[in-house]
Image: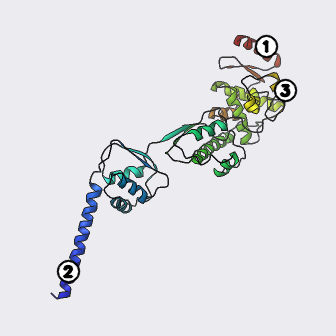
């Protein structure tokens, strides 16, 4: 064997040896159990973190000996961009492969925020602003700017967000929650608009949303909502004013002190349905699904009036004489 062949053989042998050592090192690292600093260990991966940042975070926390084995593993398994942001609780020692699968599965600890039926947009926004685990990207934005950021076509936010519980990972943007709640309302509204009762005096889904918000504020009893919707639909058909207290209260805003007086009912403004015919210009609250259904599929009734009984239920009348009798009866009971 010539000198150059012996040299080439030696080089090849060295290369093979290095590769074998590298493979052995890699195999040892990714299949060995990691040692957690504490149990359970809470790992928070911020939204937008890349593979290098996550691997560095794991190494600095002494979960893995070096970031490179984790990076190589993720690239080898084509999971470089699959790690999901969130808060993870690791309660037992894992291999790096198992850890990678855990982080790419996205089984993270979810935060939640709840929007209540009947809330105003101001209440919803305050709840978002007060939540400690959410990123407050909207805090300096106007109402219109928020709507523009989430792709809404409306210019006023009242009533546009569906009341529900929304889950998110810590550090997620409040604009994402706004967007999801807006889209949920649009989906519910469009679904029930397409299945609406024929010949309703409502020309757009937005008008249905306005009516649904009034129904939401008129009663907390779901079984009464279709009947109340029927009353409002009958009054709209006849050109009668809705004469509903919640719209007046909404229009008064901070001036409302808990008592609705006769002068309040006589003071004309855009939301006073005692002085103005038709629907108010916007919704007055976040309507839930039952109110949306009621607005678009009201009960078939001849009633034109209703009054609260004081026990959560409503009494319905077809004429003013009977209505006034019912008002006197139930007001006496509540005194």
Q: Is residue 15 left or right of residue 253?
A: left
Q: Position of residue 277 (x, y in %)?
A: 83, 33
Q: Please tell me whether mark 2 sits on a helix, a strand or a loop.
A: helix
Q: How many marks?
A: 3
Q: CA–CA distance between discs 3 and 1?
A: 23 Å
The answer to whether residue 162 of the structure is visible from this angle is no
Quadrant holding the N terminus: bottom left
Q: Position of residue 93 (x, y in %)?
A: 30, 46
Indicate which disc residue 266 carries: 3
1 or 2: mark nearer the eye = 2
Q: CA–CA distance between discs 2 and 3?
A: 103 Å
Badge 2 local density, few (<14 within 10 Å), some, or many (20+)?
few
Q: Position of residue 256 (x, y in %)?
A: 74, 27
Q: Please tell me whether mark 3 sits on a helix, a strand or a loop.
A: helix
Q: Nearer the viewer, residue 147 or 189?
A: 147
Residue labelled with disc 2: 9
In the image, residue 77 sits, relative to residue 45, either above or below, namely: below
Q: CA–CA distance between discs 1 and 2?
A: 109 Å
Q: Is residue 81 left or right of residue 201?
A: left
Indicate which disc residue 125 carries: none
């Amino acid at each position: 064997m010539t000198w150059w062949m012996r040299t080439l053989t030696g080089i090849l042998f060295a290369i093979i040896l290095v590769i074998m050592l590298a493979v052995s090192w890699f195999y040892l690292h990714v299949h060995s159990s990691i040692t957690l600093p504490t149990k359970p260990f809470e790992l928070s991966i911020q939204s937008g973190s890349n593979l290098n940042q996550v691997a560095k975070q794991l190494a600095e926390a002494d979960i893995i000996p070096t970031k490179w084995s984790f990076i190589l593993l993720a690239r080898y398994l084509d999971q470089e961009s699959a790690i999901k942001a969130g808060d993870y609780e690791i309660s037992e020692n894992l291999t790096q492969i198992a850890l990678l699968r855990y982080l790419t599965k996205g089984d993270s600890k979810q935060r939640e925020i709840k929007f209540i039926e009947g809330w105003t947009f101001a209440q919803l926004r305050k709840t978002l602003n007060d939540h400690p685990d959410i990123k407050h990207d909207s805090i300096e934005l106007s109402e219109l700017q928020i709507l523009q950021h989430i792709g809404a076509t409306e210019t006023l936010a009242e009533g546009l967000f569906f009341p529900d519980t929304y889950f998110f990972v810590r550090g997620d943007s409040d604009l994402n929650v706004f967007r999801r709640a807006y889209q949920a309302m649009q989906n519910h509204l469009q679904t029930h608009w397409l299945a609406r009762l024929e010949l309703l005096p409502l020309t757009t889904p937005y008008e249905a949303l306005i009516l649904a918000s009034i129904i939401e504020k008129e009663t907390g009893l779901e079984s009464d909502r279709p009947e109340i919707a029927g009353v409002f639909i009958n009054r709209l058909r006849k050109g009668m004013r809705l004469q509903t207290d919640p719209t007046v209260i909404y229009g008064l805003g901070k001036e409302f002190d808990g008592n609705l007086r006769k002068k309040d009912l006589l003071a004309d403004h855009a939301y006073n349905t005692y002085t103005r015919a038709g629907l108010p210009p916007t919704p007055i609250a976040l309507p839930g699904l039952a109110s949306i259904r009621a607005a678009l599929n009201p009960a078939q009734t001849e009633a034109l009036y209703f009054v609260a009984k004081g026990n959560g239920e409503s009494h319905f009348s077809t004429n003013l004489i009977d209505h006034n009798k019912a008002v006197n009866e139930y007001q006496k009971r509540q005194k």
